Image (cartoon, grey):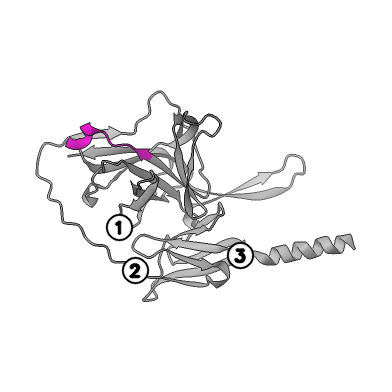
Amino acid sequence: MRKIYILFFLVVGLQLHAQTKGVVIDSLGNPIPYVSIFVENENKTTTSEENGTFSIQVLAEAKLIFSALGYEKKTVLAKEAARVVLKSVIFDLQDVVIKKARKPKTLEIGKVSNAILESFDNGPKIDAKFFPYETHYKNTKWLKKIMLFTDSPIEQAKIKLHVYAVTDEGFPGEELLTQDLIVNLKKGIYRHQFDIYDLNIEMPESGIFVAFEKMRIEINKVEKSVTNPQTGIVTTEITYAPKVMCYNVRRDFIYTFAGGKWHKKVNEEEPGKPISIYEPTLTLLLSN
């Protein structure tokens, strides 16, 4: 009888925790690619493919949060997510900034000295790095480039970058981009430079957060056969490129986005003192 009960609960569990498949479209029926899909209050995420389709293993009652720049964020029950329509939003365009022709002046910020690069897979979350404002930035106040070290086993892996303003509470807040910044990466260990000068993003005096988001899409999927040395059983291990290189540093805090919200990690054992963290190798190039 006990075996029957165990089998019953296993079957019920599998039925509840099923593969949710769907498609994300706009109000005209066009597929929306590379939408970030988070599971509320769970450390689980996925990304819609180029044709708008997605799949994720969740409970039927789980809440899925769909987020893409240029569209309203939407929360949908997994069992109702076969066809998700996102409404586009209209941004108030800021005045075009005319930068006067002058001798280029640049300043790279966020560099870490005497630190060892380490391959790092951040899992299903967004990691953000904080860049505080300093008064001597006033002569190079425009964001020109985002630089990032990655380690990718495949060519043309894709990653999503974010740029956030800082809230009054110090958390990552409003996205300063008006559309998703999705970039292609080279194979191997490489320092990428992404030019965003034309986006006219000014370094705020409250500081800025820059973050990266791994995209769980087919083009980024890496499959590897793994043999159990004890049983000899071969299984397939699935990961997603790229790994983002990090430094082990001591900071007062770090912010990560998981379960549909931002989390701040501080030193709980010794409040007020820095903690050891793995910080992504993000740096910014400022220009006049």
Upstream in sequence: badge 1 or badge 2: 2
Q: Is residue 99 left or right of residue 202?
A: left
The quadrant in which residue 177 appears is bottom left
Q: Nearer the viewer, residue 23 or 221?
A: 23
Give the crowd class for mark 3: few <14, some 14-19, many >=20 residues within 10 Å. Answer: some
Residue depicted at x 75% and y 65%:
11
Tell me if label 1 and label 2 are in contact, CB under 8 Å: no
Q: Secondary structure at mark 1?
A: loop
Residue depicted at x 56% and y 31%:
269
Give the crowd class for mark 1: few <14, some 14-19, many >=20 residues within 10 Å. Answer: some
Tell me if label 2 and label 3 are in contact, CB under 8 Å: no
Magenta stretch, residue numbers = 130-139
Upstream in sequence: badge 2 or badge 3: 3
Q: Residue furthest left?
A: 101
Which residue position is annotated with label 3? 19
Task: Answer above or below: position of 266 versus 54.
Answer: above
Upstream in sequence: badge 1 or badge 3: 3
Residue depicted at x 57% and y 54%:
42
* Magenta stretch contains residue 105: no
Residue 204 image point, x, y percent: 26, 43
Give, as a three-letter code, the residue at label 1.
Thr
Q: Nearer the viewer, residue 149 or 58?
A: 58
Which residue position is annotated with label 2? 88
Give, as a three-letter code, the residue at label 2.
Ser
Q: Nearer the viewer, residue 1 or 273?
A: 273
Q: Which mark is residue 178?
A: 1
Residue 217 image point, x, y percent: 49, 57
